[in-house]
Amino acid sequence: MSLRKIVSIQNVGKFQNANAAGDVEFKKFTLIYGENGRGKTTICAILRSLQSGESGHVVGRQTLGATSQPAIHVLLNGANQQTRFQQGAWTQTLPSLAIYDNVFISENVYAGDEVGTDQKRNLYKVIVGRDAVQKAQRLDELVKEIRSTSAAIKDANRAVEAHLQPGLSLKALLEAQADPAIDEKIAKAEADLRSVSEVEALVRHPGFAVVTVPELILARFSGHPC
């Protein structure tokens, strides 16, 4: 299925109420030309929306001051010979369309002073073909999931490390082997702790006080050897 003719465009950019007149069907090679600001970019946006089904390319170019929504009528070559953009959506799309314009170049090839990673990825998707796009999109989803999971793991690690003894790392804790004599060691440590506690209790206990013997008792025992 291919593009045959743009019948009408209403309330999209410069095309407030444009209707086809004369023989304007698309041939194998069709040249559209005009001065700047005449609507060439708007036509590319319409075709991009028709190809992708994304209504934003059209809705975002709604004619300023228009009281009605954008409406487009396009004829196609194929079984379903027409499609319409109405109520913010196409009745059917045309995925076989390929639009090579400044938007394509900016998103996939070059923008500004350097070629970014996203542009390289987008261009790779174009090169490998439409059948691989779904797999590439799934790959992007998996990469996002991996990044999200990695961030969650880092947060969990930091939460656990906040409760570790100084000098003990989470890696060392996870790699630690089970000690078969751990119960005996714990029992011994508890006994040592109790012994230390008892010693501390004795240390904190007040010392012996000096007892004064009454003089009467001293006089009674005076001169008597023990």
Image (spheres, rainbow, N blue to C red):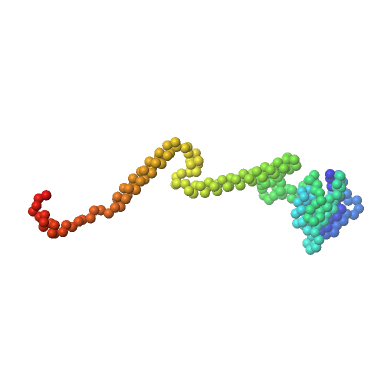
Total numbered circles:
0
Residue found farthest to the top: 180
Q: Horizontally, is 184 left or right of 153 in the view?
A: left
Seen at 47% across and 37% down, the residue is 177
Seen at 34% across and 48% down, the residue is 197
- Position in image of residue 211 (x %, y %): 20, 56
- Which of 94/25 is in front? 94
Viewer can see residue 14: no
Seen at 60% across and 45% down, the residue is 149
- Which of 55/47 is in front? 55
- Which of 27/145 is in front? 145
- Position in image of residue 9 (x %, y %): 84, 56
Q: Horizontally, is 193 left or right of 14 in the view?
A: left
- Position in image of residue 179 (x %, y %): 45, 37
Q: Quadrant of the N terminus?
A: top right
Q: Quadrant of residue 71?
A: bottom right
- Position in image of residue 84 (x %, y %): 83, 52
Viewer can see residue 144: yes
Seen at 61% across and 47% down, the residue is 148
Residue found farthest to the left: 223
- Which of 102/198 is in front? 198
